[in-house]
Image (cartoon, rainbow, N blue to C red):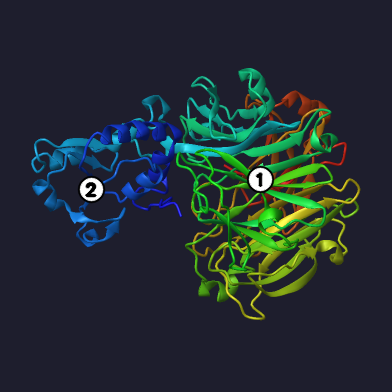
Amino acid sequence: MLNIQTFDARSGGNVLYKAMAHPLAAEQAVKLFEQLRGFDSIAVFDPDNIASALFAMHPDAPEITAIYVQDIAEVGTRRMGLWARALTELPQSHHQALLIASFNADRIRARLSHFLPGAIRIFDLDALRIPESHLSVPGHYLDRLNFATNYAFFREQNGLSTRLVTANYWAGYGAKRVRLWLRLFDITGAVLAQWEQELSSGANSAIRGVVIDSAEVRKRFNLPEFTGQLFIHAIGAAGHDVVKYALDSYAHGDDAQGGGDSLSCTHDANAWPSERYAGMPAPAPGEQVVLWVQNSHATPIPAGGIALDRMGAEHPVLLNQEIAPYGTLAIDVGDMLPGIKWPAQIELRSGRHIVRPRYEVTKAGRTRIAHLNVERADLRPDPGIKMLPEQMGRGYLLPFPLLPRDRFRSIILPTPMAQSQINLPLRLEVFDRNGVKRGEKFLGNLPRVHGVAEDLAEFDLDSGHGELLYDFSNGGDADGWLHALMRYEDKNSGHIAESSFGAHIYNTLMIYRDEPQSYSGPAPGLTTRLFLKLGDDTRRSFTCLIYPASGPWAAQSSTRFLLMNAEGIEIAQAEVPIACSGSALVFPDELFGPALVLEAGIGGYVLIRDVTCRLFGYHGLMDQKGGFSLDHMFGF
């Protein structure tokens, strides 16, 4: 387990971790530790309790002879293999060097100046600072906006490409000039390319579309074929410190796997590593499932550092192979867990080495990619959910689309997504497009190791949506972190797409904890701002919008679709009212006409707005060969 803390309430989220893990900071750390290796006796003062994480991410760091703390309660605790000493002992020490494990250490230096041995050399983490030109808030280094970063799976190999699509949503929060600093790592972790991309200037602060295509990147930098990861740092950010995107994976050319039919979409990665991930399906007959492990740090993942297990089995199988810093490794799930089959699901014990990983399923030469989700380690069953009063209505809901039955099969697989979840007490309800409930089914109090996948065909509904919710008829516990994998199969082409997400409380006047949520502002969050990418000359864009309601709400939504070009200029607008507890399947080329969508062009997008309710959406692409993609949308 990598000894890092990705959340710290004192510092505001995970900013300290991101400040140390940034690839540019990692390069500076190498230089700092090289200097420290010139001393025989090195002490560390650890006022922010981050030294362990710093040294864990840099195994070539020099040996430390003593560690000092300021909090009296920390004296005598074990850190980095040493007993923590009181800072008052430092003046009597004979260390040659002292590392102050803190950024903005000038004040600490001043306070210690009268107490330090005269010959001691002082170092601090300001040596790890990334350039001032990379800071969104120059006057406050540890401001979360200075580390608006993320990773993306990125590939241009064997006829398979990736395309990252997003928008400069920071402009909507007042950002004047935004640019992306990008670094592309290959499969070995070596840097293939590095560049910047301007998103806006002070003269034009519109929410412009953003497209980064692997084929274009390969051509621009004259690169060989590659599979790796793209590090993204948004500079000049405002409002959001996470880089949100949709990532299309698609095949092209005569040498493409599946003859050009492969097509999938995944949501952005979480910007921080987790101890475990869940929601990866075991292979169905004829399928190969490959887990893409991408190291997010400058330290190798040691052999045995990650493991796979059938969810709930508690018999993890270790990966006995080292993965290089920033390296990528494809793991055949069937090789590590022979005999495991759909609808079993797989837990990844990642040891905090990677941000949200992807998995790729190959069947009959066609591939699809989807993402795992963070399995929470901090959650415990919440007795309050069992006793939610009637004012909270139906409580937590997990909405998902039922695609048109004449073409698609729609299947749902509930997925445990917290380490403490030992059971899932669930009910399934289905609604037609007009919001009329057409059926329900009690799924039972499922054990953690269950393999229950429900085919929605049994409800005899042409299209609409389903909702998964808690039902304690047979007991069980709940923590609000209810997740499921949704799988959709084209009956004609055999192509499959899948997505996974979690439950929320939707559209109620009352709140419970931080629910209902919105994309901005505190609960209750009852507005919608969703990003819908557009297609191209061979693929149509679409969205499945759902209007879930935990309690009584407006009979119809007031939903507007704004067609924007790549410059963030509105071209057209349309209204699509959706019934409460209903849904809508919308194709922009049908809503606005093919000519206007063509005018919006590559980088154009649709902004979906509603100030009366919170909608939940899924988006994707469809091509003429039966390929399609689907994943949940992101908002801002």
Between 569 and 260, the one nearer to me in the picture: 260
Task: Count residues near mark 1 (Cα–Cα under 10 Å), then give few for <14, some for 14-19, many for 20+.
Answer: many
Q: Is residue 449 above or below residue 239?
A: below
Q: To which quarter of the image does residue 188 belong?
A: top right
Q: Please, what is the three-letter code of the amino acid marked with disc 1?
A: Met
Residue pictured at 39% horizontal, 39% vertical: 19
- Name the mark nearer the viewer: 1 or 2: 2
Q: Position of residue 553 (x, y in %)?
A: 66, 60
* In the image: residue 630, left or right of residue 299: right
Task: Count residues near mark 2 (Cα–Cα under 10 Å), then give few for <14, some for 14-19, many for 20+.
Answer: few
Q: Secondary structure at mark 2?
A: loop
Q: To which quarter of the image does residue 248 belong?
A: top right
Where does the C terminus fall, quadrant-wise?
top right
Q: Which residue is mark 1?
A: 633
Residue pictured at 66% horizontal, 81% vertical: 474
Q: Which residue is mark 2?
A: 65
Q: Position of residue 408 (x, y in %)?
A: 85, 52
Say if residue 554 shows up in the picture: no
Q: Position of residue 353 (x, y in %)?
A: 50, 48
Q: Please, what is the three-letter code of the amino acid marked with disc 2?
A: Thr
